[in-house]
Image (cartoon, rainbow, N blue to C red):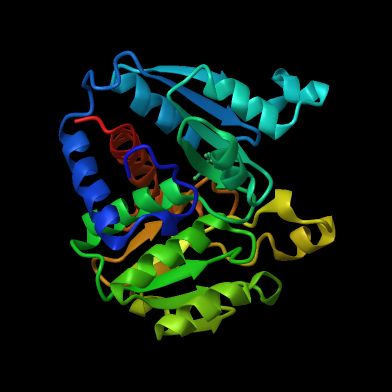
Amino acid sequence: MKNKSLISINDYTKEDYIKILNLAEEFEKNPTQDILKGKVIATLFFEPSTRTRLSFESAINRLGGRVIGFTDATSSSVSKGETLNDTIKTVANYCDLIVMRHPLEGSAKYASEVSSVPVINAGDGANQHPTQTLLDLYSIRKTQKTLDNLNLFLVGDLKYGRTVHSLLMAMSHFNTTFNFISPVELKMPNEYKIYLDNLGLKYYEHTDFTDIISRADVVYMTRVQRERFSDPMEYEKTKNTYILNNSMLVNTKPNMKILHPLPRVNEINVNVDENEKAYYFTQALNGVYTRQAILASILGLK
Ligand code: CP
């Protein structure tokens, strides 16, 4: 992991995941330290973000590092026509590591190829969101006490949702049974189903989950990704397909937990927030410890 970019969740092995999760546990016990003193991290967000950017920046600040960057490409020279190549080569001169979110699939990989410092992919289009996945694994292990043999429900926009794509790949190491619940227009892309087929893992596709939610260990809700639709009518048709409410949780397993990468739009009723099975705000908090572990591992800091 040291000095290596993190672009896809498959850049890390199962053993790497466990190392990160164990280190994140240590940071949870002691999140304020000085190990990033003297380090400068650039956060380049070409797309909006609340949790990813701010939990990275919180993680860096709590470890004594400094942050530079932009939250909106229009405030950078990209608005004057500067290329991603030139932006990354320039920013790499100013920092020890770059965290980047960009709307184009493959942009993070490209950035890592032209950068002289490691790059962390904070989301590239509908492709991957590996640091979200590591915090999701942390949240699943913390609540279920294991990552093995779980029944995982992925619900919502499985076509454009990058978090479910990365999570599927990571959980494929743990003998997971996958249930994909989506409108037909937003099904899990074939490439991910072939990926599971090749590993001999089971998955089931559904358009409704009211009758089967009692089997779930983890229900991972996702927002319909409006920004990825070329046809606004398609978004309008699918946006309110699933709205999780308390009555749907009555016969669920005692230790079942509801995760959501957030932001939420309408897919979880706010009344569910008070339910003991709702875990999504703590999941977002876990992002700080997990990202501290990722930064420390890449920068080779003890
Ligand atoms: N989960 C996530 O990526 O949230 P943000 O878009 O707010 O960063």
- Work out whether residue 133 or residue 264 is closer to the camera in this orientation and state it: 133
Visible in this render: residue 201? no
Q: Horizontally, is 165 left or right of 213 in the view?
A: right
- Where residue 277 sits, quadrant-wise, is bottom left
The quarter of the image holding the N terminus is top left
Q: Horizontally, is 147 left or right of 71 in the view?
A: left
In the displayed structure, 290 sits above or below 94; it is: below
- Work out whether residue 72 or residue 256 is closer to the camera in this orientation and state it: 72
Q: Position of residue 184 (x, y in %)?
A: 68, 77
In the displayed structure, 275 sits above or below 74; it is: below
Residue found at x 50% / y 76%: 195
Visible in this render: residue 238? yes
Q: Position of residue 72 (x, y in %)?
A: 66, 26
In the displayed structure, 99 sits above or below 165; it is: above
Residue found at x 47% / y 20%: 95
- Work out whether residue 275 or residue 265 is closer to the camera in this orientation and state it: 265
- Work out whether residue 236 or residue 5 is closer to the camera in this orientation and state it: 5
